[in-house]
Image (cartoon, rainbow, N blue to C red):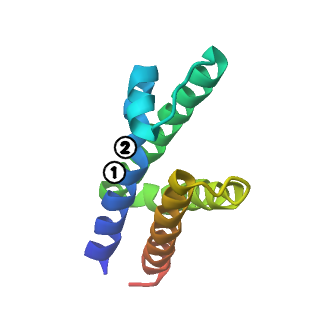
Amino acid sequence: MEIAVVVILLVAGLINGLPVIGVAGAGRLARLYGLTMADPDLLVLMRHRALLLGLLGAALVGAAFVPGWRAPAMVAGLVSMLAFVVLARAAPGPKIRTTAIVDVALSAALAVALVLHLLPH
């Protein structure tokens, strides 16, 4: 069961952390999301989002190796992804829908990992 938790944390961390490349600027964000960031305020917000997702991804990957981080990292991941899924319902475009589907699948996996982690060994 331990290996399943570690694998789920690594996969969830890497997928959540992918957007961190958007911190590099508008060009990276445009390639990542297929959207232009013409508004400087929107660019700052999206770069900040990229940074936060990178931090979440790093926490999940770190939790794969530091058992004491697991429950808090998994809860943070679940809150982040499920909040996105709820918010995505307001803009059901194809890019948002794809991300929401991935977040639902990762949330289910993280929920399983959290239960496995919390079960007495």
The answer to whether 7 is drawn above or below residue 27 in the figure is below
How far apart marks 1 and 2 lie (CA) works out to 6 Å
Q: Of residues 14 and 85, which is closer to you in this image?
A: 85
List x then y, in percent, for residue 28. 38, 27
Residue type beneath disc 1 = Leu
Image point 52% across, 27% down: which residue?
36
SS label for mark 2: helix
Place residue 54 in its image quadrant.
Answer: top left
Q: Residues within 10 Å of mark 1 (few under 14, many from 20)?
A: some
List x then y, in percent, for residue 96. 56, 53
**Outermost residue toward the bottom?**
120
Image point 49% across, 60% down: which residue?
98
List x then y, in percent, for residue 71. 51, 63
| Residue that numbered label 2 is attached to | 18
Image point 55% across, 35% down: which residue?
49
Q: Of residues 102 and 93, which is closer to you in this image?
A: 93
Is 45 on the left or on the right of 119, as rendered? right
Disc 1 vs disc 2: Cβ atoms closer than 8 Å?
yes
| Residue that numbered label 1 is attached to | 14
Place residue 46 in its image quadrant.
Answer: top right
